[in-house]
């Protein structure tokens, strides 16, 4: 897959596993998106009041800020998952900005 580019890259429930290398991860994702491609992210937040890497991505708004460095948002939504004590679940679809 090295060197391949895609029209759409999907990231779902992954960010907590790569937070310690978020900049490298986002660079790799950026390299995978075609110049006119899209990024879709679906990410829930932990139920706890404190969690690992909360200092990196502490809120849905902070996650949006990070993602908007790479894409122009087309759709952004935060839903509150009441099945899990009202934790936020972020959905963002963005068009790649084209700056490598």
Image (cartoon, rainbow, N blue to C red):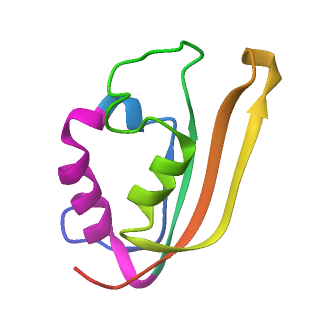
Q: Is residue 27 magenta?
A: yes
Viewer-proximal residue among 6 and 48: 48
Viewer-proximal residue among 20 and 60: 60
- Quick check: 41 left or right of 76? left
Quarter of the image with the C terminus in it: bottom left
Report the residue at 64% width, 51% height from top. 91
Report the residue at 44% width, 59% height from top. 65
Q: Is residue 97 magenta?
A: no
70 in relation to 47, above or below: below
Name of the residue lying farthest toward the right: 82
Q: How far from the left and from the top, in percent, is residue 5?
A: 33, 74
Q: How many marks?
A: 0
Give the magenta range: 18-36
Report the residue at 45% width, 73% height from top. 71
78 in relation to 100, above or below: above
35 in relation to 15, above or below: below
Q: How far from the left and from the top, in percent, is residue 9?
A: 46, 62
Quarter residue 31 falls in: bottom left
Report the residue at 81% width, 22% height from top. 82
Quarter residue 32 falls in: bottom left
Q: How far from the left and from the top, in percent, is residue 87?
A: 67, 25
- Quick check: 79 left or right of 18? right
Quarter residue 50 falls in: top left
Quarter of the image with the N terminus in it: bottom left
User: What secondary structure do most residues of the magenta stretch adopt?
Assistant: helix
Q: How far from the left and from the top, in percent, is residue 51?
A: 41, 17
52 in relation to 14, above or below: above
């Amino acid at each position: 897959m090295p060197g391949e580019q895609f029209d759409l890259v999907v990231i779902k429930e992954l960010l907590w596993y790569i937070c310690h290398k978020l900049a490298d991860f986002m660079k790799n994702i950026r390299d995978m998106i075609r110049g006119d491609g899209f990024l879709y992210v679906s990410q829930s937040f932990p139920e706890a009041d404190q969690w690992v890497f909360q200092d990196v991505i502490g809120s849905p708004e902070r996650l949006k800020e990070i993602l908007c460095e790479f894409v122009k948002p087309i759709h952004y939504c935060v839903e509150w998952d009441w099945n899990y004590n009202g934790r936020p679940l972020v959905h963002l679809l963005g068009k790649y900005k084209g700056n490598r």
